[in-house]
Image: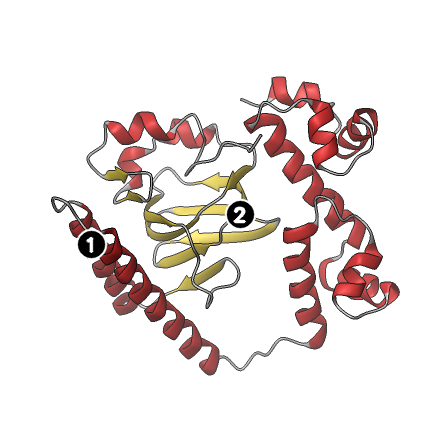
Amino acid sequence: MKTKSNILRPDMLNGFVKSNSEAFISNEFVFFRNMLSAVKQSMLDKVNSPQYVEVGRLTRVLSGTATFRINLLPYNLQKGDVFIITENTYIEITDVSGDFNVQAFSFKHLPISFPRSTQLRLSTNDFERVGRYMDLIWEVLHKENFSMQTVEYLQSALFNDLKHIQQQSDKQSTQQLSRSEQIMQRFLDLVAEFGATQRNVKFYAEQLLLTPNHLSAVVRQQSGQTVMQWLNERTILQAKVLLKHSDLSNSEIAFQLGFKEATLFSRFFRRETGITPKEYRKRVP
């Protein structure tokens, strides 16, 4: 069975969207014009377990700050940022200020120009222009018998604009990724994609056309962690989501994560977290 997923928590979304004039939801599209009024701080305080999101989303930060981990990597958001989150992503909210407020919409297919989650810190003019795009999308959504194709065209134009901004920023930057940094970035992309079931150094070394020793040395030098530490953390991340947001049994979760027996999964989970899978399910709200 698939995990349940939504903008924040699977049990939150429908209730507060239906009663909020600043949110739009349909089978094809979700748009928050103002999330401060939709999501109270008390709700955000409950988001202390990883979330899995199947569809992508674009977020425009209006005020406040928030700290996230996206597929294990940390991000700090502040006013003026635009953040593109890719499809099939694991999100952990680690800190949110009381005045954190965003505009956000979902999309089913991420433009190929953004292959991974991307944070853009925009100028005032660029940030306001993105807001005008979003206002126009909101306006179209509230027309009688609106065209979803028009919404998709507007999204495409917005993403093209953001890609141009990113390219201009890259041209002005004098900092180029070293070969080791490129390897680390590609390794983390592979961990995000395969890390729950492929837990050996050789697999990733082969994908990167490196020897296992070379990959291990680069990962430790770049991150201070071993390859296996990254892979174990990725497995735990998915395990937590499945334990909290699905009705799969421990045996089914163990099988999905590549463990031959539920007892092996339980030992692994307890070794990495200090508690058993059953205790995690009970303990996390």
Q: Are marks 1 and 2 in contact (CB under 8 Å)?
A: no
Among the 4 quarters of the image, the one containing residue 150: bottom left
Closer to us: 52 or 67: 52
In the image, 218 versus 243, the foreground residue is: 243
Q: For the residue labelled by badge 1, is the local secondary structure a helix, a strand or a loop?
A: helix
Q: Residue at x 75, y 64 (%)?
A: 207
Q: Residue at x 68, y 45 (%)?
A: 234
Q: CA distance from mark 1 to mark 2?
A: 26 Å
Mark 1 or 2, nearer chain start: 2
What is the number of the mark on residue 88?
2
Kindly identify the residue that appears in the image at 26 percent across and 42 percent down. Answer: 34
For disc 1, the neighbor class at 10 Å (few under 14, some 14 to 19, many from 20) is some
The disc labelled 1 sits on which kind of residue?
Asp
x 29%, y 44%: residue: 31
Q: Is residue 189 above or below residue 179?
A: above
What element does badge 2 sit on? loop
Residue 285 position in % (x across, y down) = 53, 22
Residue 135 shows which numbered tag?
1
Q: Specify the quadrant of the image occupied by residue 260.
A: top right
Residue sitting farthest toward the left: 144
Regarding residue 221, the answer to whether it shows in the image is no
Percent coordinates x, y for residue 266 in the rendering: 78, 26
Vertical relation: 62 (above or below) 114: above
| Place of residue 93 in the rendered image (x, y in percent of width and height, measured from the top left) | 51, 40
Image position, residue 163 (x, y; %): 40, 70
Q: Residues within 10 Å of mark 2 (few under 14, many from 20)?
A: some
Nearest the viewer among 177 and 251 is: 251
Please tell me whether mark 1 or mark 2 is closer to you in this view. 2
